[in-house]
Amino acid sequence: MMAKKRQLTPDEVSELFSELDESGVLDPDRERDRERRLKFRVAAKKAGDKGAMKRMVESDRERRGSSKVDPLSAEDPSGSKVGDTITRTAVGFVLVVMVLIVGMQIFYGVSRRLNTSNLSESVTRETVTNALEGGLEWGNGFTQFPRNFTVDHADQRNGDLEVSVVDTDSANELELLSNGQIQAAALATNALLNDRIDTVTYNVYAYVDDDGNIQRDRLFGLLPATGTRRAILTFVWSKPSRSSTSSIDWELRIIGMDEQVTSRIQEQVNSVSSLIEDPRLTQDAYEEQQYEQMLERKLRGSEIFLGGPTTRTPEEVQGSVAAAEAEESDPAE
């Protein structure tokens, strides 16, 4: 038969519980000294030495009190410093990343401003290329240019600067006109501040499909625009020579806005998508609403200020509007 486990004596039970500290953790030092203290406890009890027992109990109490563990303390009871090391490493890593980011921003900003100042002092293929790559200071920030560009002419002797860019960020003619005009203005302003530059030509190309629709990059540039490369607009900034005038008079001419491009820009300016965010409203409904508002304005007469009956009837207003539309559609008649 299997031997039964021996039950602990009262002294062994007392000794076992005395090895636990106030946090309920077993003290390894007292565990290793268990046998010696147990023998001393049994011997002192048999001999009736109450003084030895009292001294041992007081010694245990002092020892347990000195190794008291605070459960709310952030310190590791085992004395390990791993947590402090991890904290210092994390803080150091964050500080290094912040310093690196700030340093890169400062370097990038200084580089951009150097490009801008160089362009106003010297217009060469190198300075223009650096300006188009890094951007030019304009307003409160910098104007970025398309990644695909060429410097066609950069000659201070003739006072001519001409660049060509391929816009792959604009979705339509209206966006291309807006972006191109901002970019051309930034380039021309910085270049025309050079006394030896009189004309800045900014050619804007784009990729179009078979229907003439402008294509752009998608998925953050991972899917580049495809199609036929086509010249869309050209911005020509010029200034008169100082010998012919005492005033600063810069001129802008936009070349390439044919009937097709102009009509598309007008449609995009007046389109519902550019004016409202409600997808349920169609272009026809919007135009009908605009027509009704126009009729309502034309119906207003002197009665608004003087009172009395209305001076215009809806039939008269509709007839005058229809006559005006017919005259616009056929001016020869």
Image (spheres, grey):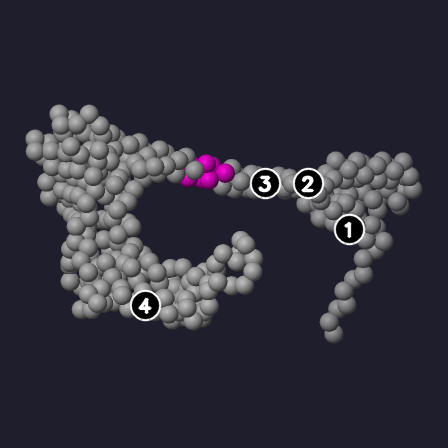
Give the spatial CA distance, label 2 vs label 3: 14 Å
Q: Say whether marks 4 and 2 touch (CB < 8 Å).
A: no
Q: Is residue 120 visible in this depiction of the protein?
A: no
Q: Earlier in the sequence, mark 3 or mark 4?
A: 3
Between label 4 and label 1, give the one nearer the viewer.
4
Q: Residue at x 22, y 59 (%)?
A: 261
Per the rendered image, the range of residues in magenta is 91-97
Q: Earlier in the sequence, mark 4 or mark 2?
A: 2
Residue 110, x across and y down, in percent: 31, 31
Residue under numbered circle 4: 323
Q: Amino acid at mark 1?
A: Leu
Could you tell me which quadrant the C terminus lies in? bottom left
Q: Earlier in the sequence, mark 2 or mark 3?
A: 2
Q: Amino acid at mark 4?
A: Ala
Q: Which mark is residue 73?
A: 2
Residue under numbered circle 3: 80
Residue 257, x across and y down, in percent: 19, 55
